[in-house]
Image (cartoon, rainbow, N blue to C red):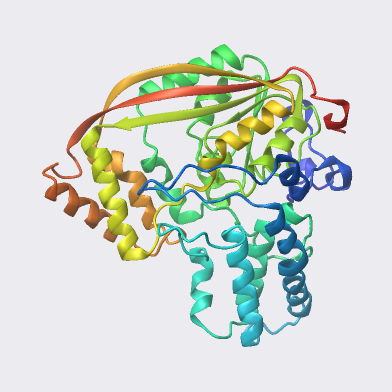
Amino acid sequence: MRSHHGVRADDVPSEVMAVIPYRSEAGFGGATRAAAIDVVREAGDSAALPPCDGRFHYVPPWRAATLETLAKEVVPPVADLAARYSTSGRPDELITAGETATLLSACEYVRLRGGGDDCTLAFGGLPSELAEHARHDRMTVRAALACVGWFNANQRFLTGVDVDPRPTAGTPPVDGALYGPELARRYDPARQVTERFNDVLRGFAKDFLGSRRVLELGPGTGRVARNIAPLAGSYVGIEASLAMIEAGRRDGLDVRHGDMMAMPFDTGSVDVVVEHESIDFCAEPLLAATEVERVLALGGQFHRVELETTPAVEIGRLQEEIAARLAEVSGGVFPYWTKGQRQRLHRWLLGRGFVHRRIELARWDETRTLRNWLQGLVNASYPSFSGVDEQTALSVCVELARAASMGDLGTRWPGQVGVVLHQYECVDWCCSGHRPRP
């Protein structure tokens, strides 16, 4: 028996199967999973985003109209290309210039959620692993199939259409996640935390998780998981990035490759879902929320753990200067993706009958190196976000820090760190029509 994400049920540890059952391939479609366009229509297109503030570009959410265009106009020609070339047997043959343009345009459409929004901080449309293909008028069949794989990995849960259902035997799975191997390498340094943060997480696990069945969304390299998994009754994580999974498994964590928008777990099979800023990187957070609602048992809880960092005022000003310079150099800086949609997600959960509590777990003063305070902006150099290499971004940080007489990147600066828990409890279904079906 094989799950939707290619994990054999025989490979799942028996203790995990007992508490968090996997669904079979047959149970993965139909009425058991919400369609993205239906969820977006129900939520409405009126999601208000905070204005871009000189440092971060808030990527707009999918709209019903852009999802319809994706399904009706963007997907079909890509599906035709996939069918035409998947069995060609000539990987080095060139496809036409028109076909090349079609594929690249489709990938950009998905990445930009239907197109640009005229913000000067907006990033480019192609991820780094595909950008090389855009340098040529005609790409090879091998490159075309790579584009099809990336496109499919990023749209199939939005449209419910799989344009590449039978990948060539022996082909490695496509990492359609935002975080590829390069950013996975930078992930932990960018989110370096003190032992105090780890203590707070362990305290959270003792107070809120106990012996319960816990599922974590997007555990990444395991920063949260390594603290909470030993204290849970059972733990499993679901992660879209293959590179992140590899890093997390080095700590012995039970992390499965999959997408939070279509999770291979049975309805009502978990007691707690934990998430730490990973849903911000999901293509459609509301679709992930429908899956959270489905897998939670009645009385279960969805815990969103947020880390709030407030550096010294001088560092805040420096961050804005660095972001402005990177925007000049590259035409784009770190997109804050869907963090601007958190209120949209909050309203949707309340509308479905969840009860919300905001709990401040801890807040403390903390001294960090200047580089640590700036690391998120250094990661703006990741090619999927802009076009600036890491060394250039670091050079900009050093130059502007010195110009502001703030010392080198090793200079320590004060700030404040807080950990806030947003708890959503599934006390009752809002109505019989919204009760998740098995």
202 w.r.t. 223: above or below: above
Q: Is residue 71 left or right of residue 376?
A: right
Residue 48, image quadrant:
top right
Camera-side residue of 304 and 113 = 113
Camera-side residue of 52 and 381 = 52
Camera-side residue of 403 and 301 = 403
Q: x, y percentage for residue 31? A: 88, 43
> Which residue is pictured at 61% across the width and 64% down the height?
109
Q: x, y percentage for residue 73? A: 74, 69
Q: How many marks?
A: 0
Q: Is residue 44 left or right of residue 399?
A: right
> Which residue is pictured at 41% across the width and 61% down the height?
386
106 w.r.t. 296: above or below: below
Residue 14, image quadrant:
top right
Q: Residue furthest front?
A: 46
Q: x, y percentage for residue 258? A: 67, 46
Q: Is residue 80 left or right of residue 312?
A: right
| Residue 231 seen | yes
266 w.r.t. 155: above or below: above
Residue 438, image quadrant:
top right
Q: Residue furthest top?
A: 207
> Which residue is pictured at 46% across the width and 51% down the height?
335
| Residue 94 seen | no
Q: x, y percentage for residue 174? A: 63, 60
